[in-house]
């Protein structure tokens, strides 16, 4: 251990340690290289992996994950985490079908109502964290369980909802094309572009980064930190709602049997973390999240083509997340001030 620490602190000719030099590189570049290496390995090991159809399948299957990863990344940059996206994603998809098929709602009206419900959940999450002071981890876990229970008692009566054959809006979103490009890929592209523009070119996005980097300094500077925290949870809830509708359209159904939705949450957080969004807050880029999403999408596709069991695939994904967390901890060590201001 001492040798590892000595190596990590070894100074280069310009006076920077290895850790300092790596911290200056956008982690998205590193994960992009790893993803390309994985693609090369897949091309050698699996026939048909490196084909236009399969690559399009990877992009299409990763679209909802990418949209949710963008929302999750923005919350994490503000030193938070949102576990309730599991139920928001499911409730939006299943609730919309339920209202449309069993109540006097049109398809569009049902989607609007469930979208408003999702945003309301985001507002409540943000308010509990920012104004009441409950840590984000416990707030969103409690909201997950509360909303899921309430939905099962008063609204949803099934674990599997199938998209009706006369669907127009959701079917077009999930299976339609725009200029020959599958609409889910277009939607994910818009989400990544919007996330990048928000963080880089809006005052709210820059202030969220500043808050995540040093919450106490942000407060002393007079930054309205509480509304910013609420905003991050609203954005995350909105991304979860869009992801749910997109998955409903792509798959033609949405199931919560056997813990449906948890895998999406796990993959979204993994994509953000391995893409360089640090759990210490304030660090990361949408470029990194994009490549983190592509890494997870390629990884899942490769595991499927290799006919690995669900258990083995889950084990490997968990190992990837643990390694990413360890690397993040080494690259961005938590000092005393970081530990004090940790809002998770």
Image (cartoon, grey):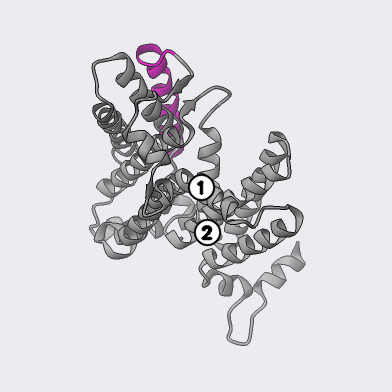
Q: Is residue 285 visible?
A: no
Residue 332's spot in the image, x, y percent? 54, 61
Q: Quadrant of residue 4?
A: bottom right
Q: Which residues are magenta?
A: 136-157
Residue at 68% in and 35% down: 310
289, 137: nearer the viewer: 289
Residue at 63% in and 46% down: 301
Placement of 249 over or under 176, stated as above or below: above
Residue 33 as seen in the image, left or right of residue 202: right
- Furthest toward the bottom, the residue is 13
Counting the numbered discs, the total is 2
Residue 35's spot in the image, x, y percent? 61, 60
Residue 3 as seen in the image, left or right of residue 76: right
Q: Residue at label 2?
A: 291
Residue 196 as seen in the image, left or right of residue 48: left
Quarter holding the N terminus? Answer: bottom right
Q: Quadrant of residue 51?
A: bottom right
**Disc 1: CA contacts within 10 A as few (<14), some (14-19) or many (>=20):** many
Q: Secondary structure at mark 1?
A: helix
């Amino acid at each position: 251990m001492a040798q590892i620490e000595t190596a990590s602190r070894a100074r280069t000719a310009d006076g920077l340690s290895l850790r300092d030099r790596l911290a200056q590189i956008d982690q998205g570049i590193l994960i992009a290289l790893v993803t390309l290496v994985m693609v090369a390995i897949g091309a050698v090991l699996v026939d048909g992996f490196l084909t236009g159809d399969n690559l399009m399948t990877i992009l299409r299957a990763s679209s909802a994950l990418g949209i949710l990863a963008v929302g999750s990344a923005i919350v994490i940059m503000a030193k938070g985490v949102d576990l309730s996206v599991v139920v928001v994603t499911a409730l939006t998809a299943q609730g919309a079908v339920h209202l449309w098929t069993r109540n006097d709602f049109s398809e569009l009206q049902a989607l609007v109502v469930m979208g408003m419900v999702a945003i309301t959940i985001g507002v409540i999450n943000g308010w509990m964290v920012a104004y009441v002071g409950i840590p984000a981890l416990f707030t969103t876990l409690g909201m997950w369980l509360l909303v899921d229970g309430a939905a099962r008692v008063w609204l949803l009566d099934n674990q599997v909802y199938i998209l009706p054959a006369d669907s127009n809006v959701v079917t077009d979103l999930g299976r339609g094309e725009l200029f020959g490009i599958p609409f889910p890929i277009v939607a994910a592209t818009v989400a990544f572009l919007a996330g990048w523009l928000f963080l880089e070119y809006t005052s709210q996005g820059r202030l969220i980064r500043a808050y995540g980097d040093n919450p106490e300094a942000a407060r002393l500077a007079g930054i309205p930190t509480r509304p910013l925290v609420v905003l991050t949870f609203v954005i995350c809830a909105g991304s979860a709602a869009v992801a749910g509708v997109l998955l409903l359209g792509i798959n033609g159904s949405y199931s919560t049997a056997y813990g449906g939705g948890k895998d999406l949450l796990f993959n979204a957080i993994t994509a953000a973390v391995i893409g360089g969004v640090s759990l210490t807050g304030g660090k990361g880029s949408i470029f990194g999240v994009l490549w983190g999403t592509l890494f997870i999408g390629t990884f899942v596709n490769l595991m499927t083509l290799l006919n690995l069991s669900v258990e083995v695939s889950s084990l490997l994904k968990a190992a990837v997340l643990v390694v990413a967390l360890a690397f993040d901890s080494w690259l961005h060590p938590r000092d005393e001030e970081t530990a004090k201001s940790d809002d998770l």
